[in-house]
Structure formats: structure tokens, C-alpha cells
Image (cartoon, rainbow, N blue to C red):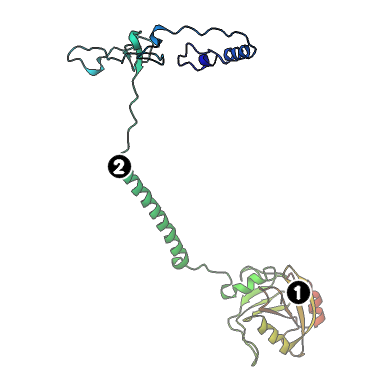
Amino acid sequence: MIARAMDKDSDRRFARCGEFADAALRALAGRATPPMPPRPADHAVTADNPGGSAIHPPPTRPLLPAGAPVDAAPRAASGTDPRAVVTPGWGGGPARPKRVARAAGRQVSSGWRTFSVLLLVSALILGVGAVAAVGVYWKFVRPPQLLPWGAQHSIAIAFPRLIPASPDVTGWRGPRCHGAATVVSAPGDPVPLRQIVCTDPDGVTAWYTEYEGFREVQAYLTAHASLTGEREFSSPGGLQVFRPTDPAAPFALATHGWVSPSTSSILVEVAWPGHTFEEVRDRWWVEAPF
């Protein structure tokens, strides 16, 4: 049973796995297994062929008339692949078609490959150059964007709900605002950088003055006002309110958003002729959308 399963001749081996399994069960049970098919004559074991393997003569090409082209070999019968060439069978058997190997695909020349690589590199260089040119233009060449408030832009964006977006429109409570051309300071006071002045229809005037930083604002307030309270405003944090120490001071109330970095360097002073500090505080400062 083992010899039949390992025989070199496929015709003598088991045809199916089930057949081999049945033979193995019969052998294990001590019963006789089906006999091995006889070896064909061309598989005979001889001195020249001790293994009994199939003996086939070398293939031969059909004889062609003298001067006949190479492709004049007989073609296969109708119904078969027209690209097949009929060759004689092995061992004198019937002729069978032999498939002609398909021609290899067209090879790309090295010149075209080099041209493609150069084209790709050129495209990359042009792309990088275009991006660099746009960056240089945007950074150094393009004309500067004009801001509605010009030099006072940092003050306007710090209080967007109080100061209008441009000097041409009005802000909270309808005031008309403008950027001060010059800012006057008393001797010994910190020097302000820029200022926006707004006056509403009720006569309330607010000066939004920006200094170098937080310390300059605190130095001014220490010299001219006293802290009277604080309230929370928006998300940045505390908003301090100050009363002037000099009754003749030009402002009735001062306020400073000392927590937020965007407002810590800006001082807001408010004057309302004919109104006290308490009236300015309760009717303007408390309601103002800082």
C-alpha cells in the first residue's frame, strides 16, 4: 500500500485520497488491499531503466521544405488557439499543439527614464520656487494693510464693544471717537504712547490711553487716584475703579483692567460734566460692556 502511494507513475498510484484512506484502513485491519495496477511496457524496469520511470524519446521538430519560412510550421486544428504550433507527440503519440511564448512587453529606454526623472525634478523645483516667491511677496513686497484706527489699533481691539470698529461709525451709547494726534502728560507722569477719545450724545467723554506697560498705568493711578472697588468683567478678570484724589482733576472716574494682558497697559478715564463720581460709576461704568 505504501509502495503504491509513492509510485512514480501517476497511473499506478491511488486516484483519490478516499481510495488511499480505504486501503490504509484495510491494511491496519489485516485485510488484503487492492492489487497494484500492472506497469506498462514503456515503464518496464530494465538495466538501463532501473527506476521504471517513463521513457520518452527526445522531441523532434517537423521537417520543413527547403527555403520554407520559420513560421511555416503546421498550425493547430480549428477551434484551438491560433498562436499554437503543432508539434509531434512524445514517444510517437498523437500531435499536440504547443503554445508559443508571448512576446515580452515593450521595454522603456533609459533615455525616456532619464527624461521622466528630470521632468519630475524640474516640477518639484518650480513648485518650491513658486512657494518661496509667494512667501517673499507676502512678507516684504505686498503693500501694508491699512487699519481703520491706524496707530491706535491696539486700543480699539482691546475694547471692541465700547470703541467702534472705525472712526466713521459710533460705539456703545452712540459716541463719536477719534485718535488723538498728541497726548499731553503732566510733568513727572509716565509718557503715554497713544490715545482714543470718545464723546457720546449725553456728554460723557472717555479717554482710552495706552502706556508702555502695566507699571506705568499703576504709577499714574498712584499719583492721581485711589482705588475704591473692583468688579469682574468678561473673561480676563478684574476691572478696578478709581476716584480722583484731586477734586479739580479733569476726570471723574478712572478704571483699569489690570488682569488681562490686552488691557493691562491701557487706562480709561471718564468725565461727565455736572455728575459726581457715584453717578458716573453707577450709570456708566457699571453698565459699560468692558
Q: Position of residue 110 (x, y in %)?
A: 30, 42
Q: How many numbered discs, if any?
A: 2
Q: In terms of secondary structure, where does tag 2 sit?
A: helix
Quadrant showing the N terminus = top right
The residue labelled by disc 1 is 238
Q: Which residue type does callout 1 highlight?
A: Gly
The residue labelled by disc 2 is 110
Q: Residue at x 34, y 10 (%)?
A: 91
Q: Position of residue 260 (x, y in %)?
A: 69, 73
Q: Relative to 182, say whether 4 is above or below.
A: above
- Is residue 34 left or right of 203 when viewed as pictured? left
Q: Residue furthest bottom?
A: 187
Cα–Cα gap, marks 2 and 1: 74 Å
Toward which corner of the image does residue 273 lie, by quadrant? bottom right
Between 261 and 36, the one lying in front of the other is 36
Q: Earlier along the polypeptide chain: callout 2 or callout 1? A: 2
Toward which corner of the image does residue 17 lie, by quadrant? top right
- Is residue 238 left or right of 119 when viewed as pictured? right
